[in-house]
Amino acid sequence: MPHHVPPLRIALIGHGFMGAAHSQGWRVAPRFHDLPAQPEMTLLVGRHAAGVDASAAQWGWNETSTDWRAAVERDDIDVVDIVTPGGSHAEIAIAALEAGKHVLCEKPLANTLEEAEAMAAAAERAGKDVFAMVGFTYRRVPAAAFARDLVRSGAVGEIRHVRAAYLQDWLHDAEAPLSWRLQQEHAGSGALGDLGAHAVDLAQFITGQQVTGVSGLLHTFVHERPLPGLESGRGAVSVDDAALFTGRYTGGAIGSFEATRMATGRKNSLRIEVSGSHGAISFDLENFNSLGFYDATAPGTRQGFTNIMVTEPEHPYMSAWWPTGHPLGYEHGFVHQAKDFVEAVAQGRQPEPSFADGYQVQRVLDGVQRSSAQHSVWTETL
Amino acid sequence: MPHHVPPLRIALIGHGFMGAAHSQGWRVAPRFHDLPAQPEMTLLVGRHAAGVDASAAQWGWNETSTDWRAAVERDDIDVVDIVTPGGSHAEIAIAALEAGKHVLCEKPLANTLEEAEAMAAAAERAGKDVFAMVGFTYRRVPAAAFARDLVRSGAVGEIRHVRAAYLQDWLHDAEAPLSWRLQQEHAGSGALGDLGAHAVDLAQFITGQQVTGVSGLLHTFVHERPLPGLESGRGAVSVDDAALFTGRYTGGAIGSFEATRMATGRKNSLRIEVSGSHGAISFDLENFNSLGFYDATAPGTRQGFTNIMVTEPEHPYMSAWWPTGHPLGYEHGFVHQAKDFVEAVAQGRQPEPSFADGYQVQRVLDGVQRSSAQHSVWTETL
Amino acid sequence: MPHHVPPLRIALIGHGFMGAAHSQGWRVAPRFHDLPAQPEMTLLVGRHAAGVDASAAQWGWNETSTDWRAAVERDDIDVVDIVTPGGSHAEIAIAALEAGKHVLCEKPLANTLEEAEAMAAAAERAGKDVFAMVGFTYRRVPAAAFARDLVRSGAVGEIRHVRAAYLQDWLHDAEAPLSWRLQQEHAGSGALGDLGAHAVDLAQFITGQQVTGVSGLLHTFVHERPLPGLESGRGAVSVDDAALFTGRYTGGAIGSFEATRMATGRKNSLRIEVSGSHGAISFDLENFNSLGFYDATAPGTRQGFTNIMVTEPEHPYMSAWWPTGHPLGYEHGFVHQAKDFVEAVAQGRQPEPSFADGYQVQRVLDGVQRSSAQHSVWTETL
Amino acid sequence: MPHHVPPLRIALIGHGFMGAAHSQGWRVAPRFHDLPAQPEMTLLVGRHAAGVDASAAQWGWNETSTDWRAAVERDDIDVVDIVTPGGSHAEIAIAALEAGKHVLCEKPLANTLEEAEAMAAAAERAGKDVFAMVGFTYRRVPAAAFARDLVRSGAVGEIRHVRAAYLQDWLHDAEAPLSWRLQQEHAGSGALGDLGAHAVDLAQFITGQQVTGVSGLLHTFVHERPLPGLESGRGAVSVDDAALFTGRYTGGAIGSFEATRMATGRKNSLRIEVSGSHGAISFDLENFNSLGFYDATAPGTRQGFTNIMVTEPEHPYMSAWWPTGHPLGYEHGFVHQAKDFVEAVAQGRQPEPSFADGYQVQRVLDGVQRSSAQHSVWTETL
């Protein structure tokens, strides 16, 4: 962290679990990467003063506030980092962009397609010196980034099949309590927006192709759940527990998608398999320091899936870290995100993925919902 | 093989790769299982005398014939075992049933839904002493049978998710030659009937539930292929290379299906994952002496997928074989099929799966084709 | 099985579990391989008439006898196949060789080094037209044979490390009953001879190197076990439960060895890892249709262990079997052994491994015992 | 990080790769754990002013120095953290302890047994309020700590077998250059001290047993290597490339050990397998968010190795981190080490492992060297 680089002063809006992850990203990125600007953890913003003060002390933010509107206007803030629930993303992000701040916004971009579209438009309006990025951090897992590199290099050839599934199981118990994540008014959708967004983005990122249409099936297995905490009685689940869909890609591939929080035994399994005319790739977030690669051009008796430990210094992001064979963890994605964001902004480049990218993912998810509501009929999304 | 049991005299119609597998089944079953009747390899039937004679000598059949119609009428034949291409299944099977012979018929039951229906009706008409069975041998892989036992025992609880995929890659090379399997007039359909039939049957077998409706997507990646052998030029592929579909099950589960012969790197991967309120199961034919089982009722810190080697004497079919830890191979499924068929027929019971079961699988596949032709719209199949 | 080839008439001495396996080998080999002679299951020999008659009926042997000495003298016997306990191998094998019969003898060659030496000498004396082979069938697992091919091709380079372990767990329960396998007078040694022999042979086979010296540690965990059956009381275990040793190889490699029947959870795990200057190989009998191969000459970012499914027609033994991706099972090793034996004998070649090879393995095991008795001091074995 | 806790002021001596790891530990620990004292990154000490200044700026240390003797005497330093090469550990650690500072020292404790003994004695002399700890961080991998918990709980029963191997491959290329790690005068030993120390410590930690004696085999495959950098010519390798040894444990178990930097394809594979009368455990650092556990008391048909993702909040260290299923990385071990050290010191408890523990590990390694020099003869180590 050379001292002569300019500061990049950050306000973090929100301080749930994602706040901890983003804080770790800003804190650690400059310790392992030589950055062209120095992120400063200037301001933490939350709704309740006591809570935000405790979080700021824990995580190392210099100041706190309960007024996000004031925060995004402050002259001494360069970046607004938004980790609130999806329903407030649009309002905060648009205000920040209009105030000329760079914005990093957690995924999904918004709870509704309209909001997402407005955010993408605001980013467009903000001009060429103000940048907005949506936080699909799994792109920054080295094995996922290396998968994309392999595809780009032609190692997979012409892609035919994409299998994308994001499987979790924290709702598999029908007596797990109701939460805001299970209510449409707060969460927009269920597994579809929470997990399906990641699956769509990562599949598109690795393949370099976009989803052109879908046939969807949303399903809710448990329609009522106990109210949380000390409340008695039950409340209605108004979002999907699971989403299944098929899709077509711009490059001619076809694919399956699944997003569920009821896949008993799967804790955080985001699996992407891509197969093409020359090879195949297999990725699973539960084993995320590795990538499976099949080279169909190798001698026939020696073909098979190679379990590549993506920990060589030549692999994406890895030169900054440890000797070969030493694994990274979940929050390294946030460190890499901070690095990429700082580098792009400091160098006047648009960081990837943009709000337009996030909006495109939302269109796919919206297509799934519309298809599901119309007997799974094929629905264009591009 | 006690000598006092009655014989069960078999005529095998067809002698391709499946003929070798069925022959091994009849040959080996009585050497490891105590059967209530003794299968005798009486007659091998094929179209060309020279070929069928060579096969009979290789495999150990007593006689040969080129006339299947005569064969199914012979008094000294008890069982007609059909391993010809699907287009001739109906004619042979119906004639055999009408002649009062028990019938074992390879899957898929037929190339068309009409033929399959006629076969199921013929089996019904044949009366309570004549039995017909369709050869979904993967039910007889011990790990698959044990998966069904676990579901029946309640170890998985209420099933929510079923993931069924049958992935092969022998067509991934766009220059692989055309064959009858790629022509609708001979094969009926492509990956759907060849591989999807297995996926549907096995998913239904393990879960004990049937598919009530589907949304399907059939796709052909390579529309023309070189003519085989010495012919020059190219011919049209008129079947699907791949089938993707979603489905609902009678018990409330939802599921995804995939069948493809272009999943580069997957040689014979029939994967079934089932997850429910109490646990989950994971099966892959490429590693078929094992079964993954997740027990969600175990102590929290000790939960995980258990890799059960399905080689204990208490596991299905295994008491006849080797000490624990000694794996079985592909053709053991045919040995178990022979055993189950002989036992059921000798004891006057209907062997599973029946022609009615095979017809029901065909209805699902037909639904996939109709849905795919109608923009993937949801299509009832039950 | 063309009918014009000469017969090879076999007498099988012994009819325990290994009798079933060898019978399957002789039965099935000619059905899948074109052999230059036709094995005939002529005579089954056992100690008790009733038992041997039942086994012969079950397995399909034409005649039975309780007199092995007469059997090995019969003019209508060409091959004596010995599957009795190790203590009787020498007497039977030497008599058969002196009678001019080809001999196939189960491993370990004998219970004592002296007997093994005598057998190797008898095989030598028998002349150039009479052949003796010891039954290390795991050499005939296609993945193991392919591992040897990879080493021979130079794909591993100069070998440095060999890890060989044969782990079972059927004695892990201290209340498992005493059996002849736990008594030195019957079994010679415990895990060392039973499992260690396989580990040494397979490691030497794959590497093409021999063990020149060892440092050994034998250990018995459970010194008394319940008497079997209806007997009360306990009897002494007089063999090793486990053997650990290190060794050096003729080509400069060093290696570790383990043999145990108390490795809880490991059912039949014979693992061989070989690493060298150019690559590495990883084999496990519990997953024996696959081989791990690491190519250290591949591009750096793409290196990793490749999980090769050893089911391609170009892989050893596989052209006779099923389409790619269809696995073999335990008894296929016995089918391949029968094939290799018949081919060598019919063509006048010495089948591998010879009795001299079996004797050399015994010398290594003897060295382990001597080293263990002398505070693990290094002991030459070549 | 509550502000009212007392500071714990740290001087870090050394700033190579281990300096980066320790810095990350001190930096991150208070952000995720509520600590009873606040680690402050006060002083970084190195030999060359420019280098240490750059590292301090990169890693966030407040001050720098090139005089470790002055550093360990400073009143404003509470903890001396030593990450220099092993040859200087004793001098620095003893001086720090004599100055009344708490000491954390990287492993191996020292290059020679004499130095290690002196360090343990110095720690003993330092009195009950001054604490010394050796940095075997792999004990702090949650899966390893959970393995120990399982053993303690009785889930493995009476331990019989321990397999411990630490396999790397960064020296497999015979043309990899000479470095200080390959020269006895600088490194003490080769793979034995570098990797074997971890294997011995972790095996003892998980089992709760100590190694009582060994039979060892040290080997150097490549005796000369190119001089590094721009120098021409070759220099002698004077340490072991690989160490193999067998051992006995205080509780009656026997075990194998391997340490090598030439296990082609293994990047950082520290594997520990423990099997006992009731179950077994399997750990591999290359897949370190998981633990294999075999429960031999489960119903027979459901036994198998369970792949436990050690990411539940009830698992060791995990409540501080992310939702279930989100993996940790290599440096989390250093964060946990910092946490455990701070907690113990602030609460007046001896942190584990102590210098006495580190010295005991050295005695085992010394026994291996003596045994290897004496034809592998058994050598007591306790």
Image: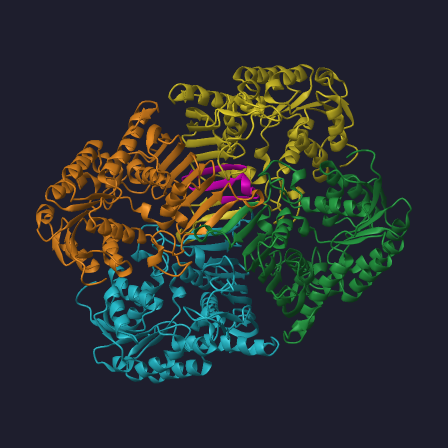
Chain colours: A cyan, B green, C yellow, D orange
Quarter of the rendering containing residue C227: top right
Can residue C135 be spotted in the picture? yes
Classify residue D17 as left or right of residue B220. Answer: left
Q: What stretch is highlighted in magenta?
A: C268-292
Q: In which quarter of the image is residue C267?
A: top right
**Image coords of residue B364 (percent x, y):** 69, 66
Count of numbered marks: 0
> Which quarter of the picture shows residue B213?
bottom right
Q: In the image, residue D152 lies at what x, y percent?
A: 38, 41
In the image, C280 versus C153, the foreground residue is C280
Name the side, left or right, on which C188 lies relative to B87.
left
Residue A187 point in image, percent of width and height: 44, 75
Left or right side of C94 for A317: left
Compared to residue A306, the image places residue A235 above or below, namely: below
Q: Work out whether A380 lies above or below C29.
A: below
Question: Image height check: is B206 above or below C203?
Answer: below
